[in-house]
Image (spheres, rainbow, N blue to C red):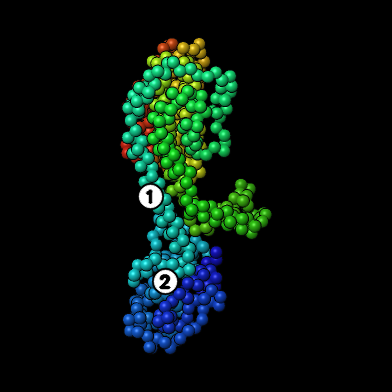
Amino acid sequence: MTAPSSHAWVSAARVADTMHVSSRVRSLVRRVWTPVTGYASIKVGAMRSAERAVRNQVVDLVEGKRLRELDPESEEFDDLIITLTCGHALTVKTLDGICELEKYYTRDNDAWTSIASPPEGFQRPPACPHCREPIKSLRYGRVYKRVDVDISEQNVATRCRWALGLVRENVATFDSGKAAQDLEMALENAGSIELPVDSEGAIKDRQQRAIGPDEPLPVPSKRFGHKSHYLEQIPAPIKDPWIKAIRRLIAYYLEAAKVARATSSHFQAYEAAVATLHQEYLTELGHPDDLPETVTPEDMALGLARTRCGIPAPPKANVRFRVEACWMTFNIRFQLASFAQEVAEIFVKAEVPKRIQSVWADMIEDILHTVERDALKAIHVARGSQSHRQILRTVLFLLEAQYQTFSHRVDRCLDSTRPQSLNDEARRGCAEAKATMAKYAQQFRDAMDSRPANQQWLEANYITPAESIVAKWAAMETRLEEGSPNNQARDAEKGQVVKALMEGCFGTSKLTTEMLEATI
């Protein structure tokens, strides 16, 4: 869009709505804008017979002029009148000031010459000084459309914050201990249950564990619910009580996943606008020879499109709460895994057939594996919006999921003949956790400035908890080397670790070494 000027003002600012002027105010105005001919003279002499209240209306807040004080024969552009939808009339100069048009266009010798870079921060809607109704004149379309986007961002943030807050409260009230007791009573006769022989079960398990590249973020709840491939292999006397026990957690998961997958209309409009402008600028640029070697026409066109679409950066509320909703699903999945491990202990006491226990252990490992997969994808989403703190918080979930996956594998392999392979895997896992921690910490330092506040946040909210997870790997490695992999952490301690991660992510408390070292 071309910036408005004194000669081509209509085509640039499109002020056709000034025709929506009440008859009594229009009769006072020498000219009004039209979408076709620019402006037309009307009823120049009608000012003398106008009502006193209308004639005394202040139309120029800069100089304090009233409508009756304007010269109908003046050729000054700033003295032209725009009548707002509320019925009040103001001069162009006054409205330009109220709408802060200089934020959106550059000016040279009192003429608007080009589009300026969009202003940063939340923009408040300009309002009529007489009645406070929002100004919606088409001359200020770039202004109020930007305001509409900012308000939409606030609305999206409010809705998502409320929805995730409700899910978090509900998850916090879930009593896994009581659910485990009820489930243990329902499984009193589980020892006599036999699992049908399925020679293709192992192949199906491996196929089920692989998550397709087209799977949404987060993974669908059917992977853990009654349609789970693993639960299909579990006899109904065990499966039905389990599904009944976790139905609330699955419902909370669905609510969080809904927030994670939602895309607001204004974000879609932003993407469509950028895509359209990108194609237009790419066509205009063609194949220029004066671009730096590191800049392609596609990059130049995309930069112009983002600069001139009217918004300084992509709307971030969607991305922010998409990542936060993923954190909530991680929390729910950790709870599911912990609850399933409690049930696995019930199976041992009830002497449930080994094949059932093996399938159940595969299901737990798959739940933890989905956290790893989704954490990596959530890191990619956060990086796309340059949310560096969200990246680090998500890395903590990734590190914890990787440790819990290996810890679970050690638990189920205690009676196996693989101590050396487990020891080697623990050594590799510890080294990889250290490398991951250092990698993302350095990326944060490179992306953020060196202010003490940023460094303090990094130390308290990332380095300290990440080092605690690395310490758990080292402790596991030591136990395996000593031949005493007594890895069963208390359920309360496991829950405390995840609780610490969630409280750090949602700002209710800092992650402390004591909370995260509980399972070492």
Disc 1 versus disc 2: distance between alpha carbons? 29 Å
Q: Position of residue 325 (x, y in %)?
A: 43, 40
The amino acid type found where label 2 is placed reads Thr
Q: Amino acid at mark 1?
A: Thr
**102 and 108: which is toward the camera:** 102
Towards the viewer: 73 or 41: 41
Could you say which is closer to the camera, residue 194 or residue 254?
194
Q: Is residue 314 visible?
A: yes
Q: Residue at x 37, y 40 (%)?
A: 167
Q: Residue at x 61, y 55 (%)?
A: 279
Asked if labels 2 and 1 touch by Cβ distance under 8 angstroms, the answer is no
Residue 444 seen in this snapshot: no
Out of 38 and 259, give the one closest to the viewer.
Answer: 259
Q: Quadrant of residue 87?
A: bottom left
Q: Which residue is mark 2?
A: 85
Does 447 sit above or below residue 190? Answer: below
- Tell me the element at label 2: loop
Q: SS at mark 1?
A: helix
Q: Position of residue 171 (x, y in %)?
A: 36, 35
Residue 445: mark in rendering: none
Q: Residues within 10 Å of mark 2 (few under 14, many from 20)?
A: some
Q: Residue at x 40, y 38 (%)?
A: 252
Q: Quadrant of the N terminus?
A: bottom right
User: Where 326 sits versus 180, above or below?
Assistant: below
Circle number at residue 158: 1
Q: Residue 274's spot in the image, x, y percent?
A: 55, 54
Left or right of residue 317, residue 511 in this image: left
